[in-house]
Amino acid sequence: TQYISKIETIFDAKRGRKRVKNQGNAVRGNTHTHTHTHTKTHAHTRPVYVQSTLRRRPGYRTLERDLIQNQQQQLFQIFVVVSLRKGSSGNTYSPEITQQFPKMFEKPSRHSKEAEDRLKAIPRFCFPDALDWKPSSDMTSETFSFVLTGEDGSRWFCYCRKILPSGKGKRLPEVHCMVSQLGCFNLFAKILVEVERRREICPALVHPFMRSVMEAPFPAPGRTITVKSFLPGSGNEVLTLCRPVDSRLEHVDFRTLLQCLSVERLLQVFSSLLLERRVIFIADKLGVLSQCSHAVLALLYPFIWQHTFVPVLPASMLDISCSPTPFLMGALAPCLPQLLELPIEEVLIVDLCANKFVVQLGDEDCILPSKLQAALQQVLEERELILGQEQLSALVSEAFVRLFVELVGHYPLHMAEASSGTCELQRDAFRKSHPSRGVRQFLQLFMETQMFAGFIQDKELRKGGGLFEARAAEYLESYPEPTGVNRFLKGLGSKMKFLQMK
């Protein structure tokens, strides 16, 4: 009751305060400036692009659906060791796969060609900074991940741990990489730590252990599996692998994102992704890039980013950032000068180490409706006072879900039966019916994105379900009263009370 009262006080204050919005004519910091009218112009051209991308990629994939479809699959498809090999001239190195389990593509097929191409791309992503590496006698192990997307939209989740092999004197690092169709970062990170432990004892222990892992089934949400293996000196060991009940959050860690970016900056990045703009993260560590990239996309739930996603872009592939289509990419800090020389149009470049925008359009703070943005910002800034660190993922997730419920949760009221027997969204009625002018203006832009088109496509085909639908149903019970931020507050407050009692 005490913390719900605190949130009510915050939201009531925000509702009574009229904010003066920055229309993009003056941008704080050392950035490129554009006027806010750019957004309006961009809105007229976007529908053509949305329609063309939907024709090209009609399959609308979600991580949740992939997890369900792959429930009975093995944990991973392939495990590789990527090492640095000295080049023919100078002290440069090139990454290459030096070990592979199991062997793939022994029988060529039309499907194996693309898979083989993706496998060949792995070394560059395992060592995106390969040209900067030198032999070392001391290095801290680092866990990170990246995603390779096929032409059909299928994804390979690649979980990596960079280590310094045991030995004496200076030596080159290597990367252990597990490739899976399943998104579950914490689970695979735990496996990779065990791989490193066995690698330090004896490299020959790695393959038997990975064979045991491959034979284990992928656990259902909230369930635990055990992997048995033999370790010299310790005898038979049992590794316990468990998944959280909420499978949406097992691939993300919001702590790193919130440590790198202030809430104000985070909401501006989030808003840019909502309009499917181009965003580049800059950081000095691979783990920070991958964790922040996955975390910020998780905030889009129930919408799914369908565009280019490269959490860690190899230095040799920076020109990909000149693509005219939406993307979220990450690059290591030494690449920033080269990136700034490239002709990248309409991009938001975010320095995660310094919590600043290197390049921005200038209207990022004007995209979300002001009252909802202010309420969400206050909740996130006082997250530790509300729940403490233990429930951080649940609090952050619930806050953003509630935002989307407030923005689009009334969509079921405007789904009508078509002559073909399917449901169709009455788009104009859906947008115009919202009581908030700010929300109506936001929807005019957001409804033109591929994320929204894919979301509604699923609803028209009567697909999908889960947390958002449950929250939307609760929201509609009181629609259209109470209004605005007050409804956002009450919905979020009740969910926080539930989480605190768990």
Image: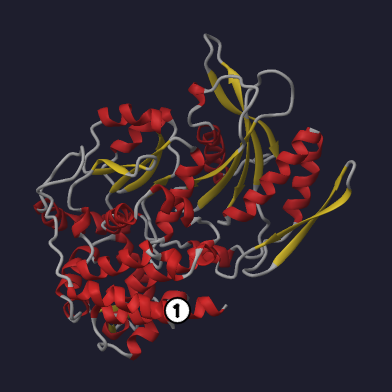
Residue at x 49% of width, y 53% of height: 154
Location of the N terminus (image quadrant): bottom left
| Residue 430 image position (x, y, % from top left) | 22, 78
Would residue 412 appear left or right of 161 to someone viewing this image? left
Q: Residue furthest top?
A: 89
The crowding category of the residue bearing disc 1, from other C-alpha atoms within 10 Å (few below 14, some 14 to 19, many at least 20), is: some
Quadrant into which the C terminus falls? bottom right
Camera-nearest residue between 263 and 420:
263
Please tell me whether residue 343 is drawn above or below residue 13 in the rendered image. above
Q: Position of residue 3 (x, y in %)?
A: 42, 77
479 or 302: nearer the viewer:
479
Q: How is the image coloured?
A: secondary structure
Q: Amino acid at mark 1?
A: Lys
The residue labelled by disc 1 is 495
Residue 462 seen in the current view: no
**Residue 252 location, x and y as percent?**
50, 56
Q: Which x, y percent locates residue 376?
A: 32, 67
